[in-house]
Image (cartoon, coloured by chain):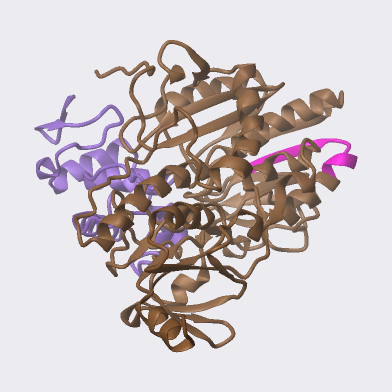
Amino acid sequence: MSNDLHALKLDFMKKVIILGAGTSGTMMANHLLGKLKKDEWSIDIIDERKEHHYQPGYLFLPFDIYTPENIIKPITAFLPASASFINEGIEKIIGEQNQVLLKNGNTINYDILIIATGAKIAPEEIEGMKGAQWHKSVFDFYTYEGALQLRNKLREWEGGKLVVHITEMPIKCPVAPLEFAFLADSFFKEKNMRNKVDITYVTPLSGAFTKPKATDALEHLLVEKNIHIISDFAIERIDNESKVMKDYGGKEIPFDILVTVPTNKGDALMERSGLGDELNFVPTHKGTLQSNRFQNIFVIGDATNIPASKAGSVAHFEAEILTENILHFIKGEALSEEFDGHANCFIETGGNKALLIDFNYKQEPVEGTFPFAGIGPLSLLKESRINHWGKLAFRWIYWNMLLKGIPIPFVGAKMQQAGKKINNN
Amino acid sequence: MEKTIAGKNITVNEEGYLTDFTQWNKSVGEEIAKENSIELTQRHWDIIDYIQNEVKKDSPLSIRKIGKSGVVDIKEFYALFPNAPLKTATKIAGVPKPASCI
């Protein structure tokens, strides 16, 4: 082909831009590449980072269960070779002009935009959280740095008051702080110092979790493990000198180590682009995953405001639905695939056991078997060793199947009711 | 389930939230407030009005959002509806418990 012809051909090429090369963005690139016609569509994926972090691994880092090498790999190792990776910051989305402005001043036009920029912690939202004690006695484990600092602290800590805390909802992986409390119980038991550690779980919710049946099961486990729970705690500020957490209602909680999940927010890019809500999450249709503002902008994963859990499993199910809907959109058809809010989460409970919960917008987590009704081998909402091995195996599945868009056998995008003890009363 | 509030038969869920907003009126709100040891003042009503308007618009509620609403700051919201202000205020306002917590 001559250069002129090549240029002409490029003019006819249409472009999908994916913002963010995390779990959702990487999955979408892999899904779409196999489905879009290569001589008609090109895919750009933009991210300022070079590394892909397996975020569920942050939970295990503080307890020396995982090493940094287990959870960090290069972004490009998981992207299809024919997608172009643009390693640059994003300044603004200009939806009216179908353009993305990069930090380096370049603009790129798109036909379809997929926002997959995720959620981040914002400790600066609470007075005193990012104060003198930040990463000294006040820690997060939702960043690599936070999890690593906490690991170093726990290695030499001699005991005292450990407070595990959620600032406000929504947060990524809503069960992670509970898992942290359970794993801490096991960790100190193994170090023969559990009697020197007082563990308290503090939440703005009315109970341990957001759904009634799972809350009952999880509160039972908290009691069994001698972890105190303080609910309905709405943090106002942290006093760094006295190491006390205070709430608007006047409650005070002293700590020696505070492990908090700070406010989670969407990317500040959404604020700059006028596309976010008050927490920079993007208003999105909860079924089709199309943005409420622009028909050719779609949103996936933690970046949306939909009432589903912010978790990798949710993003995985959404990716299958969104791929189909983007193909419908290209053909000018109705977006007929509906995401049902399906989430599937392992909950580590310590002592090499775990729970599994499987639920969606309408169906709360209940007991049962998964993925085969009556057989399992995994059990729902009940502790078992095999669930724990499932959770550990998931890291392999994540790197080798999930990111590459390879379907996970027997686990569909839509939740199945078979195998669940559903009480319809 | 059915419950008699301010002399009216009202349908509520197991947590005491009204399931049908058309059954709500100011005396119903006042009586639910009393059950929660709250005597309603004009400041309470300002917030209840705001909450009812937001729910009408299908706009999800959160404590953060109420704090940024310009109607009340979070400190005063807690002073007016102690302990769990959003849950108490929505119950009094006759609207569903906010589903902001996933």
Quadrant the C terminus of chain A occupies: top left
Extreme residue in the top direction: A374
Q: Nearer the viewer, residue A13 or A110?
A: A13
* Residue A158 belongs to the span the image colors magenta: yes
Visual hue assigned to chain B: purple
Q: x, y (%) of residue A128?
A: 67, 62
Q: x, y (%) of residue A165?
A: 62, 44
* Residue A68 belongs to the span the image colors magenta: no
How many marks can you see?
0
Image point 37% across, 47% down: which residue? A307
| Residue A52, quarter of picture | bottom right
Q: x, y (%) of residue A18?
A: 47, 65
Q: Which residues are magenta?
A: A153-164
Q: Please give left or right for residue A13 compared with residue B75 in the image.
A: left
Q: Please give left or right for residue A203 compared with residue A115 in the image.
A: right
Q: Nearer the viewer, residue A116 or A398?
A: A398
Chain in brown colour: A
Q: x, y (%) of residue A393?
A: 64, 31
Q: Nearer the viewer, residue A194 or A305?
A: A305
